Amino acid sequence: MENGSFIIEPVSFIGIPQPTETGDTRSLTGITLQGADPKYGRFRQVALLTGIPLALMIGPICGYFAGNFIDQWLETDPWFMVLFVVIGGISGVREMLLLIKKAEKDG
């Protein structure tokens, strides 16, 4: 592509192929990301559904630590911790629903 009198070309570091067009689907490893192989559909579903417990735990745990930090900083003992744990729980449930929807779509 040209920009004035300069020609801009994609740079390849350490032999990593760089996408050259907007429709290029290669990743940095050269693996095509579109068109999943149907014989691995069940494995993909298991992998997605295995992430549900992790998604349900991470939100409230992060909320606990963030809320506890803010409570110590502002000296408002349990209020931010409770608020952030509830927000983390809601985000965990939302992520769980998105994972289930994605697993159903792929299956």
Image (cartoon, rainbow, N blue to C red):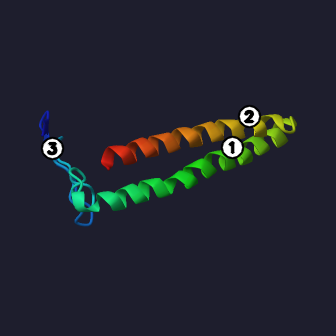
- The type of residue carrying mark 2 is Leu
Inspect this view and state whether residue 20 appears. yes
State the separation of the CA atoms marked 1 and 2. 8 Å
Write the residue at 50% across / 55% down. 51
In front: mark 3 or mark 2?
2
* Residue named by callout 2: 83
- Amino acid type, label 1: Gly
Q: Give the number of the disc on residue 107.
A: none
On the image, the x and y values in percent for residue 4 come to 14, 33
- The residue that label 3 is drawn on is 21
- Vertical order, 98 against 30 (above or below): above
Disc marking residue 63? 1
Return the x and y of residue 83 as percentages of the image width and height: 74, 34
Please tell me whether mark 1 sits on a helix, a strand or a loop.
helix
Name the residue nearer the viewer: 35 or 4. 35
Circles 1 and 3: CB distance less than 8 Å? Answer: no
